[in-house]
Image: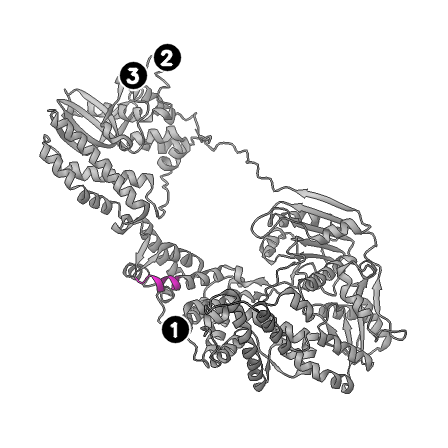
Amino acid sequence: MKFLNKIIHELLAQNTDLSAFNIILPGKRPIVFIRQILEENNYSGFLPNFFTIEELINSIADKQVIQGIPLWLFSFDVYRSLNLIPRDNFSDFLKWFPTLQKDWDDILKFSDSDQAVLQYMFDEERIKEWAQNLGEDDDVPRKKFLNFWQNMNVFLPELKNRLQEKNWATSGMIHEAAKASISDFAKNTSEHFVFCGFNAFTPVEEKLVRSLLRWNKAQCFFQADRYYFNDERQEAGKFLRNHKTWKEFDDSRAFQWIEDDFNQPKKIKVYEVSGNVTQTKVLPEIFKEINNKTYSNTAVVLLDENLLPASLDVMHGVDNLNITMGFPLKNLSFSNAVKRLFYLQKQLEKNKTSYYYRDVFPILEELPKSAKDELIINDFKAKIEERNIVYISKKLLNELLGELSYFGLLQKAASTNAYLDILISFCHQVKWLEIDDIQYENVSHFENAFRIIKNQLTPYNIEIKMETLEILINQHINSESIDFQGEPLRGLQIMGLLETRLLNFENVILLSVNEGKLPLGNSQNTYIPFDIRRFFDLHTFLENDSIYAYHFYRLIQDAKNVHLLYNALSSGVNTGEKSRFITQIEMESSHEIEHLIIENSSEPIITKPIEISKTEIVRQKLQKWKEKVSASHLTSYLYNPIDFYLSKILNTSESDEIEEELSVKNYGNLVHYTLQEVYEVLKGKVLKESDLEKSVKAIDKYINIAIEKLKHQPEFYEKGMNYIHKAIAKKVIENVLNHDLDLVKQGNKLEIIDIERKFENVEFYLDGNDKISFLGFIDRIDKLNGTLRIIDYKTAKIKNLHVKIDEDNVEGYFHNSDRKQALQLCIYHYVIQHLPEFWGFPIETGIWSFAEAKKGMVPLVFDKGDIDDAMRSVKSLILEILNPDINFVETIKSY
């Protein structure tokens, strides 16, 4: 800490009792390092007083600061009392006032008269309209802007008066109030002030410093470097060059200090990284280059606060960390849940009858919960997923979640005030649960925010909508962060750029050194145009760029090893452009810079297929499986042996997911179940034309029964793609019935024998006495002109129903997943042959595809071989599954 050491030694040389000094700093962070330096120098006297310059100006102004929500509410109360047109409600007021207030503070801090600027803005708009016919329409954008500044010339002076009556002040008003008192303060104070490490001053701060210097009651220590101070083009030295021209600095009072540190030898590395979070993955490699493994002289500076969690993840090997930047509250899970709660409330205002499941599920997942709540939520999700309920009725929600401890949060709020009470109560309950420290802090911040808003709203008769309350919460939370506690004097420092003021480190690592992050560029949120800001000496983005440039160069001027990482990927607002400060160093400095390109390689990982050996336990499970073998088991094995292992050996099943659009599987089930209901009525009958015509007319009734079987709500099929799927299903069922009707009309004798015929314990011998038992369901068995037809319904198209088996291919014929339809039909054929009730009938097996329903049943045809040959191939497949020497190996599908 070279600069701080220099200051302390200079002050000790002037006075061995440092309590005679008031040290004024840009921030409080360096105080702990100053104390350490005093300890190292064995200082035993009283400590000096430490202030920030804001604290000093506040004490001179002697006003009570008002900001944030209290200021907004008070300002709105003043605004509505003036009856200005348009009469914005509180929600509309919040859309423009926070930005205007920042502009107003800038005007008060930097201009001689805020009323002059406001009048200028109004006159400027009037001049733009000179000699133009605006018409009577108040919605013309330019006329609205003119009216806006006309209103502000009334509103802001009145707001200032009302605030002054209560001795309240915004930060701009405090500067204005202090301005008049500075001369007297400088003349009368008996204190001595030491200003350390400042760069840019507001006019009031400059007046304070210069007044104290004139009365010999202050001294200034600047941290400047010849590299950017002497070069007029260097924006980093812009303000310091101006300060050096003050008449207070003369032969008797030197401008201290201008060093020559930047040009000292340095190792500078620039890393072009593909991806934002990928930058943090480079940190462990950089740490390897640092010899001091306590990292006590190393700082990681995050220019993007969102990288903090990812950075902490890769620093698990660092023993001592000190995080001096706050973590944004808005990025934590509880914050997301609160946002979703407000979104849900807004949706309930629009739709008073039901809840959209996607609005409810994330809230239940993200809010902290007790063990009892966990059980209720799991049961609720299981039932909603099982029944595929996309829109949940209030009655059903009450039935399933009524016992939830925070059920009140999910109900439509009686009022915003009542909802705040529920939120406060909920936050209080949550803190008694077993939650981690960060979540506890998160919840506590929210509880505090809710209480502040409730207390601040009480004195005002302001109607608050849920949307407005959400804006208030978001505005408050966006400015809040969770502070970390650490040991600032040991270990690695993780900080934002502003926290580095006055501090120096040997090793500096900056992440996100991108244009738009460093400097911020032209991203100012303001209503005052650039040229007017320049005219009235208000800060523009150019001044802000100079401030950031100074922080950047000052940080690296004393460093020996500098690592600058930037995200080279363009995505969203990120252009993938490195900061111009990097380019400046490359072009203008004498340092050699090493460039590294870090690729975020997304090459496919070469993985081996999963392979499961048939251990003793697996073989025992396979012996059990032999008692109940279905055709679908064999087709599952053909498709992927690992799927067969997971579902048939381990008995795992896929979890239910809510379908907003009917899946192929459930579309097939809808047609299947409907046909089952239709033909169940006709079972055991020789079909007549009248039977089938009656069935065609009753299709809608049968579809509704099938929907009940699927446990779907009828509303699920009322609109969108699901309405179309239902209409297509109805057409498919009509085609099936009309095909049968045509057969009957042509004089064929068609009899429905059975529907969803279950079979089990049909034995099939493998080798010697070793056997398996087939089990399953046949979708439809009918008799057409004396021939028994075994029909399987399929959603897919028909494939490979011509069987060609000979001695050369018999063993492996059905070891091909393309022949699974034929495999299934061969097993059904074998089963029917072995059921005594069907002996003696000629048998035909086939597929009836819903994709080509008009074709009717397409039969299995043996071009070569017969059913006995086919069953030899089936036996070969079953023996492979049972073979202990053949592992289950995953089938990798090539796409």
Distance Cα–Cα, label 1 vs label 2: 81 Å
The residue that mark 1 highlights is 418
User: In this view of the protein, can residue 757 be seen by the observer?
Assistant: no
**Label 2 is placed on what type of residue?**
Asp
Q: Label 1 to label 3, Cα distance in Å?
A: 77 Å
- Please name the predominant secondary structure of the magenta segment in the image: helix
In the depicted view, which residue is nearer to us: 638 or 796? 796
**602 relative to 268 in the view: left or right:** left
- The residue tagged 2 is 808
Marks 3/2: CA–CA distance: 11 Å
- Specify the quadrant of the image occupied by residue 721: top left
Q: Is residue 374 left or right of residue 744?
A: right
Colouring mode (rainbow / by chain / secondary structure / one colour): one colour
Residue 529 is at least partly visible in this image: yes
Q: Which quadrant holds the N terminus? A: bottom right
Q: Residue furthest top?
A: 807
Q: Which residues are magenta?
A: 344-352
